[in-house]
């Protein structure tokens, strides 16, 4: 075990949320104690209280109450929904490197939004999750910058006597390139050395994880490192190119140094695909050989209405063979007509995946898909310890045009919500 049982025992004695965390960590066989008060609305967290945590990714408006593109009234309703339905939260963006550490150096951090997120979770007795420490996207270019020319670069010297630097300046205004660094833009300038990038990674992880030690209970340490292409195991990111394949193990090592009691997850999408799943299993076995402290598998589950019980059941069966807890980290079910061919989570491709209108009978197909998915989660409840929706309602979802969640933009429950609750009711043991 990589967590301190005596410390967690003290937490467990304090609140139901920490009892729930003990279940996630595998430290307790006792069910959670949250339940609906008589006459109160049915809630997801109560319906699944004996099985797994039910969480949600929240945006900055929900964490702080600040008004953005949603009116003050709607933001207040969003907040009320999160408090009513969920017992665990993750941040959509505010712990990503680009947001929390936009500038180089110790004074380059912006902790205020992340602090507000953590405070929201503490005030509402929720298990708090950190997302994410190392990712190929939404990482500022300064992280990768240095004095080493990129591979294949022409070391031409300009009129000022400096090595020429390739930049994104030539990209057309408003364009977005897929790649590394920034938000979908590829950093192409001179690079840091392996030692420089490892030092930056360690400093960042120690600063961020250390700041929230004991408050954030689980971290997505490395996000989406597996390749979607051919037989390649790892995505060809700058982390891989500069450091090498051991960058993943190093990230887990640094996170464990910063908080020995935190649950550390590897997180990825598309694990419903057998080919991607095989790569996951290879990667986790490799990390174990490297003695990396990987405590849980994060499966994003950005799926579509064509996803069946059988598909999810098979995916969970194979992931469970690794012997680690499974956390469903970013669940949504895309109803858009163009979103039915895959389960990718590429940000740049998301716009196309949520276009073309909705599939026929979208509400019913969404309800049927969610029912099958949750039946699979319950079948594998010995492994599945957490289910987190990626957004509170359709209006705040990154896939809002695909209407992928259980609540509409007015926070009203959809047929899919009732379908999920029925799955929980059907799973209750019968009494004579």
Image (tube, rainbow, N blue to C red):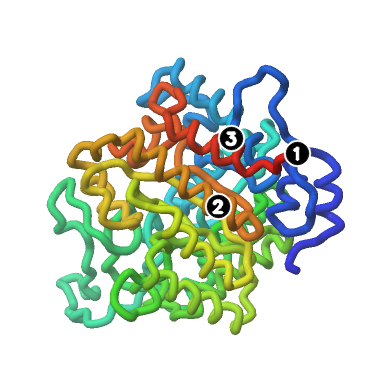
Residue 20 at x, y percent in the picture = 72, 46
Q: Position of residue 397 (x, y in %)?
A: 38, 37
Q: Is residue 48 above or below residue 323?
A: above
- The answer to whether one can see residue 20 in this image is yes
Quadrant into which the N terminus falls: bottom right
The mark closer to the camera, 1 or 3, is 1
**Which numbered circle lies on residue 253?**
none
Q: Measured from the top left, where is residue 263 in percent x and y?
A: 66, 59
Between 16 and 275, the one lying in front of the other is: 275
Q: Label 3's element?
A: helix
Q: Is residue 108 visible?
A: no
- Tell me which residue sits at (38%, 54%) in the image: 138
SS at circle 1: loop
Q: Which mark is residue 377?
A: 2
In this rendering, would 176 be left or right of 64?
left
**Which badge, 1 or 2, comes first in the chain's sequence?**
2
1 and 2 marks in contact (CB < 8 Å): no
Residue 431 has which mark? 1
Is 211 left, or right, of 348 in this rendering? right
Q: Is 334 positioned to the left or the right of 155 in the image?
A: right
Can you identify the residue that label 3 sits on?
44
CA gap, disc 1 to disc 3?
Answer: 23 Å
As helix, strand or loop, the secondary structure at mark 2 comes to: helix
Cα separation between marks 1 and 2 = 23 Å
Pick whichever of labels 3 and 2 is earlier in the sequence: 3
Rendered residue at 22%/82% (across/down): 152
């Amino acid at each position: 075990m990589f967590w301190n049982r005596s410390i967690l025992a003290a937490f467990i004695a304090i609140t139901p949320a920490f009892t729930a965390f003990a279940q996630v960590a595998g430290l307790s066989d006792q069910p959670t104690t949250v339940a609906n008060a008589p006459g109160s609305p049915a809630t997801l967290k109560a319906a699944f209280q004996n099985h797994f945590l039910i969480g949600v990714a929240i945006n900055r408006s929900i964490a702080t109450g600040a008004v953005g593109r949603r009116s003050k009234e709607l933001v207040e309703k969003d907040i009320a929904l999160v408090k009513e339905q969920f017992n665990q939260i993750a941040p959509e963006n505010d712990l990503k490197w680009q947001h929390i550490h936009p500038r180089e150096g110790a004074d380059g951090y912006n902790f205020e939004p992340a602090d507000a997120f953590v405070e929201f979770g503490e005030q509402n007795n929720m298990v708090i999750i950190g997302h994410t420490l190392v990712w190929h996207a939404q990482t500022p270019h300064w992280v990768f910058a240095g004095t080493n020319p990129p591979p294949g670069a022409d070391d031409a010297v300009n009129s000022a006597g400096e090595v020429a630097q390739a930049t994104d300046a030539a990209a057309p205004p408003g364009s977005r390139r897929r790649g590394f660094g920034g938000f979908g833009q590829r950093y192409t300038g001179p690079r840091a050395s392996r030692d420089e990038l490892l030092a930056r990674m360690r400093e960042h992880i120690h600063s961020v994880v250390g700041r929230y030690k004991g408050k954030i209970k689980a971290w997505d340490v490395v996000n989406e490192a597996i390749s979607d292409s051919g037989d390649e195991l790892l995505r060809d990111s700058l982390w891989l190119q500069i450091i090498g394949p051991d960058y993943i193990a190093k990230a887990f090592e640094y996170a464990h140094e910063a908080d020995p009691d935190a649950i550390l997850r590897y997180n990825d999408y598309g694990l419903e695909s057998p080919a991607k799943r095989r790569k996951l299993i290879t990667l986790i076995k490799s990390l174990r050989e490297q003695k990396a402290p990987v405590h849980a598998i994060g499966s994003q589950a950005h799926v579509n209405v064509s996803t069946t019980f059988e598909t999810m059941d098979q995916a969970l069966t194979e992931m469970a063979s690794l012997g680690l807890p499974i956390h469903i980290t970013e669940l949504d079910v895309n109803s858009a007509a163009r979103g039915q061919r895959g389960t990718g989570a590429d940000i740049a491709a998301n716009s196309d995946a949520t276009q073309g209108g909705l599939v026929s009978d979208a509400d019913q197909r969404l309800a049927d898909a969610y029912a099958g998915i949750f039946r699979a989660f319950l079948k594998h409840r010995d492994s599945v310890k957490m289910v987190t929706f990626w957004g509170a309602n359709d209006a705040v979802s990154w896939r809002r045009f695909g209407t992928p969640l259980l609540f509409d933009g007015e926070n009203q429950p959809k047929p899919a919500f009732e379908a999920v609750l029925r799955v929980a009711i059907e799973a209750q043991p019968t009494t004579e």
